[in-house]
Every structure is written in structure tokens, then in C-alpha cells.
Image (spheres, rainbow, N blue to C red):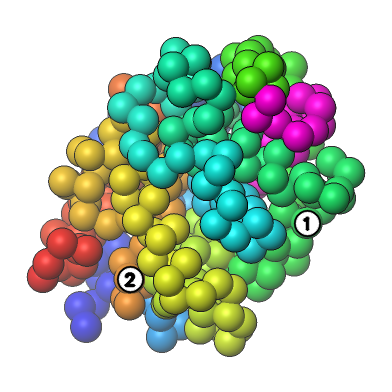
Amino acid sequence: MADLQAIVEEIHEKLTPRLGEGKVADYIPQLAHVDPKKFGMTIVTVDGDVHKVGDCDEPFSIQSVSKVFTLTLALGKHGETTWNRVGREPSGSAFNSIVQLEHEEGKPRNPFINAGAIAVSDLVLAGHTPREAIGEIVRFVRYLADDDSIAIDPEVAKSEQATGFRNFALANFMRSFGKLDHPVEHVLGVYFHHCALAMTCTQLAKAGLFLAASGRNPLTGHTVVSRQRARRINALMLTCGHYDGSGDFAYRVGLPGKSGVGGGIMAVAPGKASVAVWSPGLNHNGNSLLGSLALEMLATRTGWSVFGQ
Ligand code: GLU
């Protein structure tokens, strides 16, 4: 196996002159004030080796990366009936688009655009109060990463709530089509809180490791999902994980991945490793600019790709 520690250090070194490129999300102050020059990267291999560099142990707002964890929970609770509420096709439009939702009568295209993740929050809420559902999500992520220090940033959750007008619009729209079972405020309470999870690259890479190892976390020995479900979640990340930039990410990186507007990306090299990278500057699709580049460099150096050697 390639010397992964040397590779992450080389990637960091090569990208250092470019730190600060891209546009930091500014719709809430907690994201707008993040130092744009932060950069962290952690690789956790299926053998349990950890290779990391830069600001890899500093927590950041994982935002939409959390949608992978809520989808996993919803599938665990509802199985294949999850797909009655949300589709599995790339959207081809912006992450918070409302237009498509009208055409499709309140059934969002996929679980990773905002509307789809809101539908998934509704499924996670089944049988719970919002507080219990949020607690379940946090416990699940802690279990995945085997790290009880992971928490939600309450200030981020509050700001999301205060500025989430478009998410309220999406949720109300779905509710008007009878596509949400719970009150909009409850569903969005869950959604805003899981977006506000704060995690480090190392925690995120560990939390995603089950997806690289056929559904079982090799660090803890816990079987999280079946082999088939891990493959399917990876398929969704590959086709839908980067909003309208998913095709470009597949072309350049060739690995399933999920990005968030906080500048984080979690990527999975099946059978090999889970990788998390954080660089707050975003490209025009809302995906981390240097984070995508770092993963492209990693894929080139290691040959990791789901499309061939
Ligand atoms: N909380 C953000 C929103 O709903 C998440 C967006 C993202 O990470 O892409 O607008």
C-alpha cells in the first residue's frame, strides 16, 4: 500500500499556497467567520490506520454531510419504504431548489438535496419527539465514530433556524402535498440540528468507515448496515452527494462522497479507506473547492476509484 501519511502531507504542502481560495458560506455568522485558510484531512483505512494532516482535529460544521447519517438511520427504521418519500435520482439543480419539487408533487429527487433531507428528517422523527430524534441522531453518530465527545453546535442550530426561510418553504410545500407526517416546525427542528453537528475530519472519517468496509466498522467490530445497504448508500453519494456538481466530482475523484457548505467532504474508497477533508472555501456548486482538489490528488496518487484501477 502507498505511504498514505506521506501522501496527505504532500497534498497539504501542495495546496498550502492556495489556502483561502473559494467562497466561504456566509448565510449564517458562524460559517461566515470561519478562517478560510483552515485545511484538514484524515484517512482511516479499513485496517484501522489513521493518517492525518493540518487542522484535522478541529471541529467544524458538517452541515449536509450529516445527511448520510440521517439517511442511514431512516433506512434502518423504514427499510425500502423510505423510497416512497424520496427518490434516488441526481437532481441537476441547486441544493435548495424548489422548482423541481413542484413538478414532482412534493417527492424530492434524492435524500441529499435539502428537500430530500427534510423528508428523511420526517422519517427519523417517526415515533419520537423532536428532542428524542435529535438525541438519536447524535447517539448514532457517536456510535459510528466511537467518540462520545461529538455534539451539535447550538449556536449554529439557532442561526439555521433563524435564517432557514427557504427550508421552511420547502417543508411547507411538501406538507401541502401531504408528504410530511409531522408538523413543519418539528421536522425542521430535527433537520437544522443535524446540520449543526460539529465534527473533526478524524471523527468524520471514522464515522464513515462502515461505508468503506461493507457495512461493518472495523474499528469497533459493530455491524452498522448490511453489505448491500452500504453499497447502495455509496451509490447515492456517488450520484447525488455533491449537488449539481456530482458528475464533476465522480469524473475527477471517482469515489462516493458527500459535501457540506461548511467545507467538509466525507469520501469513501470501498474496501480501502474512509477520508474526510475540510477547507471552508466553496466552489460555485457549494462544494469545498480545495477539499475536492485534495480528494482528486489523493485518488490520483493512490489509484483509488470505483471505476477501475
Ligand atoms: N443547513 C444548510 C441548509 O439547509 C445545509 C446546506 C448544505 O450543507 O449544503 O441550507
Question: Residue at the spot x=66%, y=73% of the render?
Answer: 146
Q: How many marks?
A: 2
- State yes or no: residue 8 in magenta: no
Residue 138, visible in the rendered structure: yes
- State yes or no: residue 194 in magenta: yes
Number of the label disc, if any, that sits on residue 270: 2
Label 2 beta carbon within 8 A of ligand 1 = no
Number of the label disc, if any, that sits on residue 136: 1
**Other-residue count near label 1 (Cα within 10 Å), few / some / many at <14 / 14–19 / ≥20:** some
Q: What is the span of residues highlighted in magenta in the rendered image?
A: 178-200
> Label 2 is placed on what type of residue?
Pro
- Secondary structure state at the residue bearing disc 1: helix
Residue 189: x percent and y percent? 77, 32
Tell me: 14 left or right of 222: left
Q: Which of the pair 144/56 is nearer the observer?
A: 144
Residue 59, visible in the rendered structure: no
> Label 1 is placed on what type of residue?
Glu
Q: Which of the pair 58/82 is nearer the observer?
A: 82
Tell me: 101 left or right of 254: right
Tell me: 74 left or right of 246: right
Residue 149: x percent and y percent? 74, 61
